[in-house]
Image (tube, coloured by chain):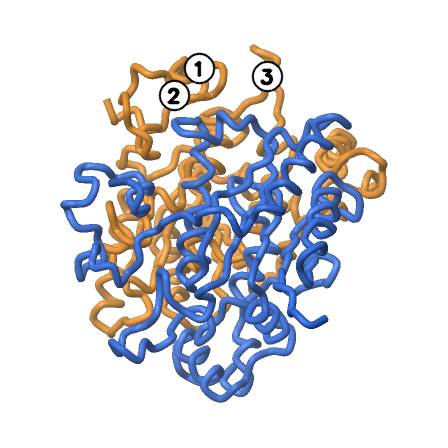
Chain colours: A blue, B orange
Amino acid sequence: MTKTQPQALWIYAHPEAKSFNRDLFDAGRAELEKTHTVETSDLYAMGFDPLLTSADFGSHAHDDDPFMTRWVSARADGEVPADVLAEQNKLLAADLIVIQFPLWWYAVPAMLKGWMDRVFASGFAFDIEDPETGGSLRYGDGLMAGKRALIVVTAGEHATALGPRGISGDIDTLLFGLTHGTLFYTGMSTLPIHLIDQADDTTAESSAREITRLTERLAGVYEEAPVPYRTRKSGQYRPARVLRDEFVPGRVDLGIHRAESE
Amino acid sequence: MTKTQPQALWIYAHPEAKSFNRDLFDAGRAELEKTHTVETSDLYAMGFDPLLTSADFGSHAHDDDPFMTRWVSARADGEVPADVLAEQNKLLAADLIVIQFPLWWYAVPAMLKGWMDRVFASGFAFDIEDPETGGSLRYGDGLMAGKRALIVVTAGEHATALGPRGISGDIDTLLFGLTHGTLFYTGMSTLPIHLIDQADDTTAESSAREITRLTERLAGVYEEAPVPYRTRKSGQYRPARVLRDEFVPGRVDLGIHRAESE
């Protein structure tokens, strides 16, 4: 190879070796492999430990300091558990991050949440000092800046119930803590969510159609415009971290955090 | 005792034996014990297994059916894992359910999410046939009807950032999948969220103030009005499960699912 391929990391959180989710995962990876070096984290298959405890804080596990303080101390001393460090290094190497999971109770499965809780650690994903301001980098800035993230989520429900004014809440809002509060927080550019509805009631035809829709989306993943979340440095938030009144006045839905709302 | 006391169940998901969260837990339980029989689920201390896999499906673990179908089969045959059944029975016995956790990445910790994923099982919390309609009971109806739920959540952030138009999203919306999508889904009446902000930066004074605020709230917990979410049976949603246009027209924030919005 004379030219280095872009790298993709596919995080996969479904427990079954054979499932519709697995078919999507296999087809999606195969598509990306045409143009990327693809790394995966098949969390159930890896037996990833999803529980954040002070066991992650190395020699600071039993210090007298509060929980978060010990986490900072551990990171400062370079004490990061091997399984967490491996995931962090995969993230650092990736240009594109795909996160695939079934929607359980309108949120990510515990396995994926635990991957976030542990891997998006203090000093890696938050509590990173901003050399310019002395504050901390977040919301549009951080170690993940320049990377793209795509959420692929299956749901056992009709898209209408997960759309605007749907009874379950719209998927963008339900996953805001992930797309905006976690991925964009660390600097990633997040793409519109790829929702696959009625995933508990598939036919051979609907499965094939969804696999095609996913692979076509992946083929054009660098042509897409990321969700234009407002950055913290944009000056559009007051010091109390509330959106200034002049932007989309009167609205309180989470869509206000997108600059396209003007 | 001639009169049976009401029963409370306190679900607690923080890893530390000594912490501000633990102090809130201890004080809160002591307050409830004045008037309730109090049961607890200290999830980390119990070593609760947060990972839903087909191991929960008894003899149907390896059937050829899809994941969800096997879960239904297991429940139909009364095959519920002992640790899950114990939690389900605690829920059934409770009049009041308190769920306490630190906000990690704008959501519940993996441990608590896993408790939801496994305990809120098929046939217990969803996929319960409605004898009237032949559909399934959900959103305001179910085995948890008549119970009250209170979320107690600590966050390492100012309340303004977690309030209306706050940069992180308001706490009601961030936790909508829990309050509305999980607890209200199963029939519970959910009370306004009890948010404790700046929890990573407490002083002896602020801790004492928050403990008092929590115990006072618990003392009056039956006098409070639950969040008036619209039920599925209210007729306010179209068959596509989208809120009818005549209710709070034009709005798309998740506050539209509260009847008080009129």
Q: Which residue is mark 1?
A: B238
Question: Are the residues under badges 1 and 3 in a single subunit?
Answer: yes
Residue B131 drawn above or below residue A252: above
Residue A56 occupies quadrant: bottom right
Determine the residue positioned at 30% across, 38% down: A253
Q: Earlier in the sequence, mark 2 or mark 1?
A: 1
Question: Are the residues under badges 2 and 3 in a single subunit?
Answer: yes
Q: Are marks 2 and 1 in contact (CB under 8 Å)?
A: yes
Q: How many marks?
A: 3
Chain letter, disc 2 residue: B
| Residue closest to the far front | A2
**Label 1 CA crowd tier, 10 Å (few <14, some 14–19, many 20+):** some
Q: Quadrant of the C terminus of chain B?
A: top left
Q: Secondary structure at mark 1?
A: loop
Q: Are marks 2 and 3 in contact (CB under 8 Å)?
A: no
Chain letter, disc 1 residue: B
Report the front residue among A70 and A141.
A141
Question: Are the residues under badges 2 and 1 in a single subunit?
Answer: yes
Foreground label between 2 and 3 = 2
Left or right of residue B146: residue A11: right
Determine the residue positioned at 27% across, 67% down: B207
Chain letter, disc 3 residue: B
Residue A198 occupies quadrant: top right
Q: Secondary structure at mark 2?
A: loop
Label 2 sits on what residue type?
Answer: Leu
Disc 1 to disc 3, C-alpha distance: 15 Å
Q: Which mark is residue A227?
A: none
Report the front residue among A254 and B222.
A254
Q: Earlier in the sequence, mark 2 or mark 3?
A: 3
- Residue A28 visible in the current orientation: yes
Q: Which residue is mark 2?
A: B243
Residue A22 at x, y percent in the picture: 74, 45
